[in-house]
Image (cartoon, rainbow, N blue to C red):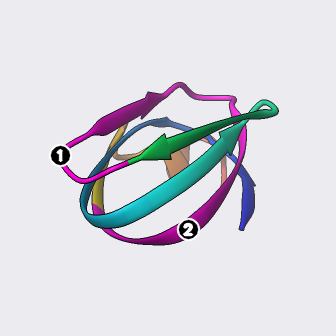
Amino acid sequence: MAWTLLYDEVIFVIEGKLEVTADGETHRVAPGQMLWIPEGTELVYGGHALFGYALYPGNWKALHGIE
């Protein structure tokens, strides 16, 4: 899934391996690892993983006029 982040994001992998291609560079995130991605980054998510994420700011949709 291709996306340009409208917020800062932290991804943490629980199981499997997540591949995130950000601005043309692929990052492979394994269980126990985290990845911080700043706002404005063009990325593609891939791989097969159970992961969680947190983002900031929580009202990013309102700030970008999406709601």
Reading the image, the residue beneath label 2 is 47
Q: Nearer the viewer, residue 41 or 49?
A: 49
Q: Amino acid at mark 2?
A: Gly
How far, Cα to Cα, is label 1 from label 2? 16 Å
11 in relation to 46, above or below: above
Reading the image, the residue beneath label 1 is 32
Q: Position of residue 62 (x, y in %)?
A: 52, 49
Q: Position of residue 29 (x, y in %)?
A: 41, 46
Q: Amino acid at mark 1?
A: Gly
Residue shown at the point (56%, 53%) measured from the top left: 19
Q: Is residue 27 magenta?
A: no
Q: Range of the magenta residues?
A: 30-51
**Helix, strand or loop for disc 2:** strand
Q: Position of residue 3 (x, y in %)?
A: 73, 54
Q: What is the magenta segment's predominant secondary structure? A: strand
Q: Is residue 20 left or right of residue 55?
A: right
